[in-house]
Structure formats: C-alpha cells, structure tokens
Image: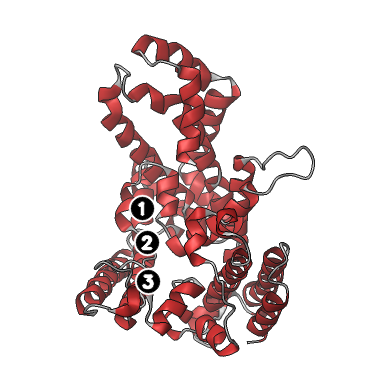
Amino acid sequence: MGMCSIVYAFTKRFRNESWMPLATFVYVMGHFVYRLFQIQIISVIHEKLILNFQHIDPSTPMMLMVLRLTTFAWNVYDGTLRDEDVISSIRHKVVKEFPSLIEFFGYTMFFPTFVTGPSLDFMDYREYINETGAFQKIPSRIWPTLQCVGLGLFFCGIYAVYMDTYSYLFMSTSEFVDNFNIWQRIYYCQMSGIVARAKYYGIFKMAEGVCNLVGIGYTGNGVWNRGQGVSIRDVEFGQSFKQLLDNWNMKTARWLRNCIYIRFTNQKRLAGGKKQSTSFVTFVTFMVSALWHGFHAGYYLTFGVGAMFPILARSMRRYFRPLILEPSSLAWMKPLYDLLGWFFTWTSLNFVAAPFVVWQLEKSLAVWGSLHYYAVIVLISGFVLVDGVGGGKWILKNVGKQVGVENVSTRSKQVPKKEN
C-alpha cells in the first residue's frame, strides 16, 4: 500500500518529466529487491518457508506489482506525448487521463490477477471496469474458462506424476552420473525440462482461466487471449530463442520488451549520438529479469547464458537464412533449416533452464557438468566460427554466389532489421 501510494503521488506530480518512468523503476525495483533479499537470504531459507507452511511467501505478488507500477509509469508519461512520438506497438496503452485514487488502487489490487498474475495494463482494467471497448458485450465465459482450467489441471497432473521420475535435482548427484551414459543423461535432461515446464504451464493456464472467468480475458471478436501467459505450442516447437522467449511468460516478456529493451534501444548515447548495441541491451534485459526473480545463483546462470543464445541466433540468421530463401537454389532446404532451428533451440532450452529450477550454484554446475556442458560448447563454438573468425560472412558471400543469391551484402543487412 505504501509503495503504491508513493508511485501514485510521484507519477501524478511528475508525469510530464522524461525521467519520471526511470526514477519510478529504480524506486520500485529497489524496494522490491530489498524485500526479496530479506525473504530469500536474511529471514529464512526460501525452501523452508514453503515446505513448513509457516509463512506466506509474498514474493510473487510483489514481482507482479513491479510489473504493474513500472508499466503504469511509462504509460502515464507516454500519455503526455504526441501520438507520433510514442512507440507504435504500445500507443493504444497510453494513459491520457490520470486515474483517481480509487481507480488506481482498484487496478493495482485487482484480486483475480493479484496473486499469480497475469499483469495487465491499466487501460485494460479501465476499459473492463467501465465496460468500454471489447468489454461492451462479453460472450459466454464458460467454455474459455473450462478450456484453460482443464489444460492447467492436465499439466499439473503431468508434473505431479513425473516430478520424481524426471528431476533436474537428481541430475546433480553422483548416482546420476554413475548409472547413466552421456546419451541417456542428455535424454533425461530433455524429459526433465518438459516436466519442469509442465508445472508452469499449469499455473499459467489456470491464471488465464481466472481472467476468462471474470471476463477481463476477453480481447474481442470472439478471442480470449488478454490473460494468456504462455503459448505452449510456440514454446515447445519454437524455431528460435526469440520465438520461444516471446511466448514464455508472455506478460513478463512484454514488460521486459516495452519497459527495458525498447526504451534502451530508442535512447541515444550522450557521446556520439549512437543507439545502444542491441546485443548489449539484450544482455542487460536478461540480467534485469534475473534480478527480478531473486538472488539464487541459478537464476543468473540461466539468464546469463540464455542471453547469449538470441545474440548468436541473430548472427546465424543474418548469414545463413538468405541461403535457403528464394531465389536460392537451396530454398528446398527451408524445412530442414526450420527443423534444425527447433532442435537446437529446444535442446538448448532444456539445458539452460536447469539452474533456474535447481537454484544452488554448486548443484547447477553439477547438472551442466553431467552433460559435459554441451550447450555452452555449442554456444562458444558458434560465436567463434560465425563471428570470431568471420565464418558467417565467408559462407554468405561464397556460398551465396554458388546458389544464386543476388545482392548478398544488401540482404545480409536487411535480415536483422526484419527480425528486430
């Protein structure tokens, strides 16, 4: 209540100042990190809090409050700008009319999304409460709700049945290494990743079902995806890390993109007037995500190494994708290119995600060590061969001529822009 009151007063007083959203972010994130440090490090070990049921763990509602308040600050500031000065993808979310105190607290304390999310924009809440926009006429909520709840229970069931059979934590033991060969360990890692994600799929889908139940999940034109937190198909069958990340924890991904990544990439450096490197901003964004999750070392291993894969994928896409697109004579290999993209993305995800679940540094490294660090080796080799020694440019230039790709140098510069 105190943090929300301060943000309300601060954003109302300084909503015309360009530094207001950043100052709000620093305050809210700083306050949250301090509380999270008390919960995870100082007070009691986080696992003991949960297992003994002695206390309520407030970290998840606080995480969601960070998303709401910082997004609200940016939307309020954007509402003071001309439409052409606002990023087009978030133009419909700007807050032109500052809310009353009761409306603001109605949004921040909105019960259906308070505990587990998803985090919605203020304008979504305003339209829902006032029954405007898509909420003027909401169709039957029964089937959209049952779909999400049923799917959520299904994945919770998968997790409950297989959580002991396929466990990242077991991979950190000597027993795992002694009783499985390397190929069996890699297979076990993939299955452990599926089971670990099943828990989150269950949570995401049931939270989405709550949004559909109360009606705020309705988007319009018969579509119910405003409360969607994950696209299971795109996560499991994504052909790139970008596609995967855009569809996992979608509201948090949107927050990272709209409040951090886009803001950094659109700000010019004081010296030279150049925009920030997208690779640098990508890494910073992943580290903010790690800090937002907490202080367990596993988070930083997952997000630190995970940040490198989209950067490598961007280079590989720049140099290799033009070779399998029309008018290239290798265009028939496009399905194979997509299949390999999915395979390396999926197997790398299951490797990288292990520390996120295991938490502890020693056990996280033990899991990776049992797999001979295969994804890290692929990552380093890719950077060295594609960018380090110029292999990507050489292949694009020389192979491109052989397969009939015209204007290779021009195409290589256009592709990243399309992806970004």
Tell me the amino acid under the disc marked 2: Val
Discs 2, 3 touching: Cβ within 8 Å? no
Task: Tell me the residue that label 3 is attached to.
Answer: 203
Q: Is residue 30 above or below residue 290?
A: below
411 vs 394, nearest the viewer:
411
Q: Position of residue 197 (x, y in %)?
A: 37, 60
Disc assigned to residue 230: 2
Q: In this view, does 93 lie above or below 216?
A: above
Q: Where is residue 420 in the image (x, y as percent from the top left)?
A: 49, 42
Q: In which quarter of the image is residue 116?
A: bottom left
Task: Tell me the residue that label 1 is attached to.
Answer: 235
Q: Position of residue 130 (x, y in %)?
A: 41, 83
Tell me the amino acid under the disc marked 1: Val
- Specify whether residue 361 is in view: no
Tell me the amino acid under the disc marked 3: Ile
Pick whichever of labels 2 and 3 is earlier in the sequence.
Answer: 3
395 vs 349, nearest the viewer:
395
C-alpha gap between disc 2 and disc 3: 10 Å
- Image quadrant where one finds the N terminus: bottom right
Q: Which residue is drawn at 35% across and 46% down?
A: 238
Q: In this view, does 88 lie above or below 380?
A: below
Q: Position of residue 6 (x, y in %)?
A: 70, 81
Q: As drawn, is 135 to the left or to the right of 49?
A: left
Please, what secondary structure does the residue beneath circle 1 have?
helix
C-alpha gap between disc 1 and disc 2: 8 Å
Discs 1, 2 touching: Cβ within 8 Å? yes
Q: Residue at x 31, y 47 (%)?
A: 237
Badge 2 crowding class, 10 Å Cα cut-off, few under 14, some 14 to 19, many 20 or more, is many
